[in-house]
Image: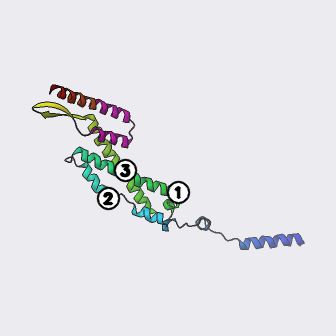
Amino acid sequence: MSKRIVTALATALLFTSCVKEISSDERLDRETKRSDALTSTTAGDLKSLKCDDITSELSKARDDTAPEEKRITIYTDLFDRVKDRTAKFEDALSRNPDLAYQEGSQEIIAARDGCIQSAADVRLDFEGLVREIVQLPVVDEYRDGKPVKAARLSFDTLRTAIEKLGLDDKDTLLTRLANAEKTVEVKDTKRKRDK
């Protein structure tokens, strides 16, 4: 045999004996490094940042027997809290995606999903109450045996709630509220002149 053939066979024998077949999972595990994201302080903070405490206060806000002004105030507070917590989750997970995609991150994802669900529940109920009040913002009160138009609740509180929700038809709702406010002011002015 020629020297070139012997060299080629020796090289082929050397490469075939060194190649070890590994699975795709083993190759992936070898190539990807496991980060310490789940042991960081951010992960610990996110695990403790849950929206479970919102449920009891949400039931207080849903109580139809409570004054509407108090209910609006509770909804406003809850809306701010769940929005803030959800933003913290999204910010932390966008900065460090390993917090969401590593083995053992289920607790963080469950807490985030719980806050997203709580935010949706609060927003839905809050918006429903605001729309209900805007439908009938002025009621009849009886003073000295005569019906008088009066605000159902503070127009400023309702205006703040509409702004906070950031609804698509915000301008329409605010216009309707302004028109209702004029009705109450006109009635108040007439009463003052009559006296």
Q: Position of residue 5 (x, y in %)?
A: 86, 70
The residue carrying pointer 3 sits among few (fewer than 14), some (14 to 19) or many (20 or more) residues within 10 Å by Cα, namely: some
Quadrant in which the N terminus appears: bottom right
The residue at 25%/35% (across/down) is 137
Q: Are marks 3 and 2 in contact (CB under 8 Å)?
A: no
Q: Determine the CA span between mark 2 and mark 1.
A: 26 Å
Q: Position of residue 22 (x, y in %)?
A: 63, 69
Please state which amino acid type lies under the numbered disc 1: Arg
Under mark 2, the amino acid is Asp
Residue at point 36%, 48% (across, down): 120
Q: Residue at x 78, y 70 (%)?
A: 12
The residue stretch that appears in magenta: 152-179
Residue wearing tag 2: 53
Please, what secondary structure does the residue beneath circle 2 have? loop
Say the numbered circle drawn on residue 95.
Answer: 1
Graded by Cα atoms within 10 Å as few (under 14), some (14 to 19) or many (20 or more), the crowding at tag 1 reads: few
Closest to the observer: 126 or 193? Answer: 193
Q: Is residue 121 visible?
A: no
* Dominant SS in magenta: helix
In the image, residue 139 lies in the stretch drawn in magenta: no
Q: CA distance from mark 3 to mark 2?
A: 14 Å
According to the picture, the residue beneath numbered tag 3 turns out to be 80
How many neighbours does mark 2 have within 10 angstroms: few (below 14), some (14-19), or many (20 or more)?
few
Verify CB contact (< 8 Å) between mark 2 and mark 1: no
Name the element at disc 3: helix
Image position, residue 117 (x, y; %): 37, 52
Q: Is residue 187 left or right of residue 109?
A: left
